[in-house]
Image (cartoon, helix red, strand yellow):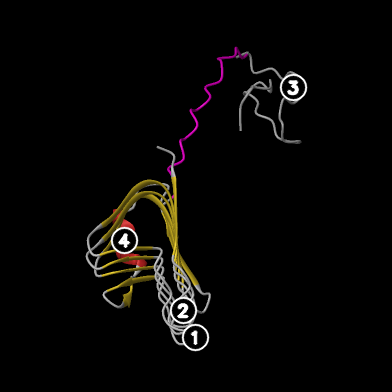
Amino acid sequence: GGSTVTANGGNGGSLIGGDGIRSGGVVTISGNTVNAAGGYGGKVGGYGICSFDRVAISGGTVEAAGGNGSTGGGSGIYSSDIDLSGSLELTAKAGSPSGRALSQNGDELDLNTIKDKLSPGAKVTATNANGETKQVSIPRPVEPEKPVIPEESSSSSDGGSSAPSAPASPLPGLTVTDKSGAVISYTS
C-alpha cells in the first residue's frame, strides 16, 4: 500500500558483509518499493537480496546492490531460482570485485530469458562489478490517435479556376486543395 522497505546489511569489518535481505525460504516482492544493500566486507561483500530457495519479483520498484569487499563482491540478488515477471522496475548492482548483479545458481542471469515474462512498462537493469550495464525493458503501447475526418466541403464542378484562399497549414508552403483550387481544411 505505497510502503517502502529499506534493508541494509551491516559492515563485516575484516570478514564478510551482512546481507540486506536473507532467507532460507522464498522471497516474494509484488509491489511497493524495496531497497536492499549488502554491507562492506573486509574479505567479501554481502548480498542485497539472498534466498537459498527462490526470489520472485512480479511488480514494484526494487533496488538490490551487493556490497564491496577486498577479495570478492556480493551479488545484488543471489538465489538458485530468480523469477522476474510482470510490470516490475528492478535495478541490480554487483559488488566489487567479482560480484554478480543477478546470480542464479552461481551464474549471471541472462536477461534475454526473462523478456517474455515481463509486462509493458517493465524495466530490468543489471550492472556488473566492472560498471557495465545491461538492460531489458518492455515499452508501454502507444495509443494511436483517432483519425480526424474533415468536414465535407462543396466544390464547384464547373472546371473553372478560382483563386485559392489563404493557406490554413501549420507547415509553411503546404496546402490541400480540391480540384477547383479551393483550400480544404486538414490535420497533419
- Residue at (72% x, 20% y) in the render: 161
The kind of residue tagged 4 is Ile
Give yes or no for residue 148 being in the magenta stretch: yes
- Residue at (69% x, 17% y) in the render: 160
| Mark 1 or 4, closer to the camera | 1
The kind of residue tagged 2 is Gly
What is the C-alpha distance between the residues marked 2 and 4? 31 Å
73 to the left or right of 106: right
Helix, strand or loop at label 2? It is loop
Residue wearing tag 3 = 164
Mark 2 / mark 1, whichever is N-terminal? 2
Judge whether 1 appears above or below 76 on screen: above
Residue wearing tag 4 = 114
**Could you classify mark 4 by the number of other residues whose Cα lies within 10 Å: few (under 14), some (14-19), or many (20 or more)?**
some
Helix, strand or loop at label 4? It is loop
| Mark 2 or 3, closer to the camera | 2
Mark 4 / mark 3, whichever is N-terminal? 4
Q: Are marks 2 and 1 in contact (CB under 8 Å)?
A: yes
**Could you classify mark 1 by the number of other residues whose Cα lies within 10 Å: few (under 14), some (14-19), or many (20 or more)?**
some
What is the C-alpha distance between the residues marked 1 and 3? 79 Å
Helix, strand or loop at label 3? It is loop
Q: Position of residue 1 (x, y in %)?
A: 40, 37
- Residue at (52% x, 22% y) in the render: 149
What is the C-alpha distance between the residues marked 4 and 3? 59 Å
Give 160 or 111, whichever is nearer the viewer: 111
Mark 1 / mark 3, whichever is N-terminal? 1
Judge whether 70 appears above or below 58 on screen: below
| Mark 2 or 4, closer to the camera | 2
Q: What range of the chain is rendered magenta?
A: 139-155
